[in-house]
Image (cartoon, helix red, strand yellow):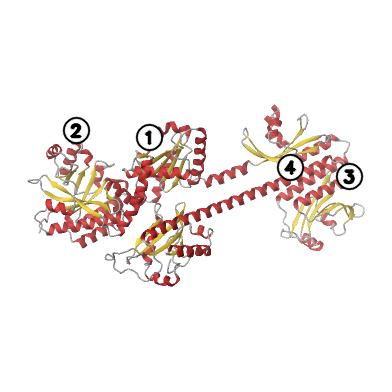
Amino acid sequence: MILDDTSIVGQDTGSIFKGFVEAPRLTGWACHFAGVSHVFIQCLDAHGNSVTDLIGDKEEIARIREFIDQDQVEDMLLRVSDSSLEDRAIESTPFPNLKIAVVSTKIENKPVVNWLVCGVLSDVEDDSEYPNHALEGFRSTLTTQQFYNTIDAVSELSTALFQYRLAVVAAEAESRRSRSSEEAMGVNLRRAEALTEIVSLLENEDSIEKIMLRLLETISKFLNIERDMVARVKKDSGQVEVLAAYDINGRATEIYHEPDLDRELLLRAAKPLVLSNNAVMNTTEKDTMERLGIKAVMIMPIIINNSPEMYACFYERNYERTWSIEEIKFINDSVKILQSILTRRVQRNSIASSYESIETILDNVGSAVYVRELSSRKMLFANSIMRKTFAKEIEDGSIDALLSVKIEGESGVCEFYQKSLDRTYDMYYTQITWVDGSPVSLCALYDISEKKVYQRRIEQQAYTDFLTGLYNRMCCERDLARIVDEAEHSGSNGALLYLDLDDFKHINDGLGHQYGDVLLKAISHSIQRVEGITSTCYRMGGDEFVIIIPPESFDRRNHIVAEIKDIFAKPWFLKDADYYCTMSMGMVEFPENGTGVHDLIKKADIAMYEAKKSGKNRMAIYSDNIDSASHQRLDMEKNMRDATTAGFREFEVYYQPIVDIKKPGSPCTGAEALIRWNSQEMGFISPGEFIPLAEYLGLINPIGNYVLMDACNTCRRWNESGYPGYRVNVNLSVVQLLQTDIVEIVENTLKESGINPHNLTLEVTESLAINDMERMKKILGDIKALGVRIALDDFGTGYSSLNHIREIPFDVIKVDQSFIKDLETDSYAGSFVKMVGELAEAIGVNLCVEGVETKEQLDIIKEMPVDLIQGYYFDKPMTQTAFEKKYLPNMH
C-alpha cells in the first residue's frame, strides 16, 4: 500500500493487471494528472500492492504521508473491492480539510487496479467538529467540488484505459488464433497441392528418371529435406546405384554411383526404416549413422513384383531432424504412387492393371477422392472412402451438383457442410490429365468435423457461465446486439428483462455459499424452461440475470413475465427445508427505448432498482420518469454517504407512541423509534425512499447502530426523569442481525447508554425465515440473555409465522397494519387478529396492533385480547421534543 507492499485484497485479477499497462506509463500519467488537478495520487494493484509511489508536489509528499491513516485506507480498499455495486469510497479524515478516496477499476465485477487519491481542500471553514485543526502550508489545494470532479475523472479515465487495453488484448488473442488457423490451412493446402502434383505424374509420359526427379523435388520442397534419392543395389557388383537425386539447393542428378551410401543400410530396409539421432537405435545403426555423417534418415522400399527392387532415401547431414507422423505418412503415400508408376511402366500394356494400382493407392491416402469429366461431368473415379461416405449421393446422381456448388475456377480449397451426414469437409480441387489424356477435375475431401466440434466447444466455454450453465455477459451483449439489429430492420419489437434476487446475501450468509450456488442453479434451470426464452437467458454475475424476449416472442411478454413471477412465488428446497427467495425485475422495450446494448442493459437495471425500491418482489417497466428518478438516486446516494460520514447530523430519530389499552385511561407506555432523514441538499426524504437505498449500499448497519444508541440514551433519560416504566422499541433489520458482532453491539450500547435492558424492545421481521433458523435462535437467545425484550414485527406477512413463535420465545407479537386497514369490513382480518390475540394469551406474550387510524377500528380491537396499540389515531411519529412535550409533561 502507501507505506509498504502488504497485500490486503486477494483477487484473481491481480495477474491481469500486469499484462495491461506498464508501471512507468502509469507513473507518467499519474504525475501529469496530479500536477493538473493538485491532488496526491497513487496506483495500487488488485491486491493492494503499490504499483507507483505516492505522486504529487515533491516537497509536500513527505508531509501528506504523515496525515494518511493506513488502516482507514485498507478498510476503504476492502469495501470497494468486495462490493459488486460500489466502485469508489470517499471519506473524511481527522483533519477538516483533508479528504481521501479509493477508486476501483473493475473488469467483470472484479478489481483490476485501485487509485488512492488525497486532496487538501481550500474551502473548509468550520473545523469545530474535527479533532485536529486544518492542514496549512500546502500549495496543492482544491475546492471540495473540484475534489469530487477529480474522483469522477480518475474513475472514468481508468475505466476507459483498461477497457481499451482489454479490447487490445482480446484482439491480439483473436489475431493469434486466426494466424494459427491460417497456418494450419496453409499446411493442408500445400500438402494437397503437393499430393495432387505427385498424383498427376501417374499419366506423365516422360522418362522414369525425370518422373523420379520431379517426385523427389516435390517431396523435398514440401518437407524441406536436405537430400533425397531413389537408389538400388546392383545384384552383380553389389554397388549402390543412384537412379535420381535431388538436394535442397536445387541440384538434380540422374544415374551415378554413390560410394558414401551404405549397401548394408539399404539391404536392411526391407521394411520402412526411420532413424534420427534422438531415436533408440541398435549399435550397428548408430555406428553406420556416425560413419556416414547422417543425422536423420528415412528409407522406403519400392516393391515391384513382391520384391524390394529400389529404395527411396531421404536424409539430413547438417541439421538435427525428428520425423513426424505426418511426414512419414506423406512420404509413404508418395512412394506408393511412384511404386504404382513403376509397376505401370513394367506393365505398360495393361491399362486395367495401372488403374487398379491407382485405385489401391488412392484408397489409402486418408481422404475421399473424386474424379469427373469436365465436359459431361460424368464420374470417372471415386475411391473407397468416397463411395462409402457419399453412397446415396453417388447412387442418385446428385454428387456432382453437391460438389459443384463450392467449386470456383480450376483449382482451390473450400469448406462445406453436408447436412444429411452432419459432417464438415475441407475440399481441395484441381484439374489434371486423366489416363486417357482428357482433362478432368480431381477433388480431395478431408473430414474436419471433429475439429469443428472442438472449435464449437471452445466457443461454448467462452460464452457460458460455469456455475449455472446459462450464457454469460459476453454472450448476452453479442446476442442482444444481433437481436436489436434484427428488430430494427424488420420493424418489430423485443424486450429486455433484468432480474436481481432479493436478499440473496441472507441465504448465502445464513445457509452457506454452497447452498447459494444450489439456489442459483435451480433458478437458472427454471427460467430456462419458460417458453419463448429458452435460449436467451443469461447470468450477468452474482445474483443478477438478464432475459431477452426476442421479437418472435414479444406478443407473449406478459405471459413470460407471469411465468417468471410464478417461479419465485414457490419455495426452494435447501438444506432439508423450504426457503423463499423473491426477485425484483426491470423491463425495457427495444428499439423504442434505444438500440445500444449497454444503454438498454442500463435502462433495464434502472427499472429493476425502481422495482426493488418500491418494496421488492415486483416488476417495473422503464420510462423517462424512472430515468430521472435514477439520477435522483445517484444524488441521494452521494448525500447519504456524506451524511453518514458527517456524524449522522442530518438523521433524526422520531418517536411514535405505543398505548396500553388494558390500563385505565389507555396511557402511553413507550414509543417506537423511527429514523428520519432531513438532507441539507435534498430536503426531507421519506424512509420508504432512503432505507432501501441504505440496505443496497450497505449503510443500514451504521445507521441502525446510530438509531439504537440514540433511542437507548433517550429512554434512559425518560426513565431517570420520572417515567421509569417507559420503554422504547427499535427495529433491527436482518442485515444487522447477520453482523457477526451484533450481540456485542447491543451489549455495548446497553452499557454505554445505561438503559435498563428490560425497557428496550428490539423488533425483528419475519424475513429472518429465509436464514438459518438455528443461527437466528442463537443470536436472539444471546440478546434476550442480556435482558432485552424481542418483538416479532409485521406478523402475518411472512412465510411460516406460527413456526417462528414456536422456535423463538418472543415477548411481543406485532400484527401488521395490513390486517387493520379493512377491519370494519373484512371478517377474515378480524378473525385473524382475534386468533393471534388468543394465541398470545395462551403463550404469555403481549400483542400489539399497528396501523389503527379510526375510532371504529379502536372499538373493534378493544373487544379482542389485544394489549398494545400503535397508529395515527393516537399520533404520527414526531420529534423527540414534541413527543416529550405531549406525553411526558412532568419530566424533571
Residue 280 x, y percent position in the rendering: 72, 58
* Dot 1 or dot 4, earlier in sequence: 4
* Dot 4 or dot 2, earlier in sequence: 4
Return the residue at label 1.
Answer: 562
Residue 325 x, y percent position in the rendering: 70, 50
- Quarter containing the C terminus: bottom left
Q: Is residue 239 above or below residue 416?
A: below
Three-letter amino acid code at the position of disc 4: Val
Residue 552 x, y percent position in the rendering: 48, 32
Of the residues tagged 1 and 2, which is closer to the observer?
1
Badge 3 element: loop
Three-letter amino acid code at the position of disc 3: Ser
* Dot 1 or dot 2, earlier in sequence: 1
Return the residue at label 4.
Answer: 365
Three-letter amino acid code at the position of disc 1: Ala
Residue 827 image label: 2
Q: Residue at x 45, y 71 (%)?
A: 58
Three-letter amino acid code at the position of disc 2: Ser
Residue 749 x, y percent position in the rendering: 23, 60
Task: Residue lying at the far left in this picture: please name it.
Answer: 664
- Quarter containing the N terminus: bottom left
Calculate the distance from the C-alpha at mark 1 to the C-alpha at mark 2.
Answer: 30 Å
Of the residues tagged 3 and 2, which is closer to the observer?
2
Return the residue at label 3.
Answer: 207
